[in-house]
Amino acid sequence: GIDENGKPHESLNHYSYGAICGWLFGGVCGIHYADGVLTIAPTPDKTLGWAKAAYDSPAGRIVSGWRYDGDAVTYEFEIPANLTADVTLPDGRKFTLAPGKHTV
């Protein structure tokens, strides 16, 4: 990291930053893309209020977000062309989204 004179001399890209990003993308916003398969399983939390993540995957931009309005949760998804997403919501609803922007 930083030497005794306050100058950076090594990488400042520590694992902890990556772990937080992984939690936000894969946990909170629920984006999972591997081998050409996209699943989204967000886990909203009222203490956060809202979250949104955009991932520029090899297939195109994937967006997953949610926000609380009182006790109701609104979800927003963006699926790139030539891809579908299997979505699972915390209340057990499951559905497949076609390419495009969707609000649930």
Image (cartoon, rainbow, N blue to C red):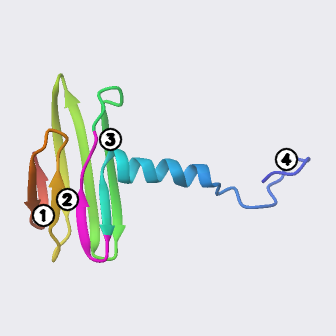
Residue 6 numbered tag: 4
Q: Relative to 98, is 15 on the left or the right?
A: right
Q: Quadrant of the C terminus?
A: top left
Q: Based on the displayed image, in which of its 4 quarters is residue 36 positioned?
A: bottom left
- Name the residue rendered at 17%, 24% in the picture: 71
What residue is pinned by disc 2? 78
Question: Whole-Å distance between the Cαs marked 1 and 4?
Answer: 48 Å
What residue is pinned by disc 3? 51
Question: Whole-Å distance between the Cαs marked 4 and 2?
Answer: 43 Å
Residue at far top of view: 70
Question: Whole-Å distance between the Cαs marked 3 and 1?
Answer: 19 Å
What range is drawn magenta here? 34-43
Query: Residue 33: where, in percent of width, then height?
Result: 31, 67
Kindly indicate whether the residue at mark 1 contacts the one at mark 3 (C-beta within 8 angstroms): no
Labels 3 and 4: the sequence-earlier one: 4
Labels 1 and 2: the sequence-earlier one: 2
- Name the residue rendered at 17%, 34% in the picture: 73
Q: Amino acid at mark 1?
A: Gly
Mark 2 neighbour density, 10 Å: few (under 14) some (14–19) many (20 or more): many
Q: Based on the displayed image, in which of its 4 quarters is residue 45 positioned?
A: top left
- Name the residue rendered at 81%, 51% in the picture: 2
Labels 4 and 2: the sequence-earlier one: 4
Query: Residue 14: where, in percent of width, then height?
Result: 65, 54
Labels 3 and 1: the sequence-earlier one: 3
What residue is pinned by disc 1? 100
Kindly indicate whether the residue at mark 2 contacts the one at mark 1 (C-beta within 8 angstroms): yes
Q: Is residue 20 above or below residue 79?
A: above
In what element is the residue under mark 4? loop
Q: Quadrant of the N terminus?
A: bottom right
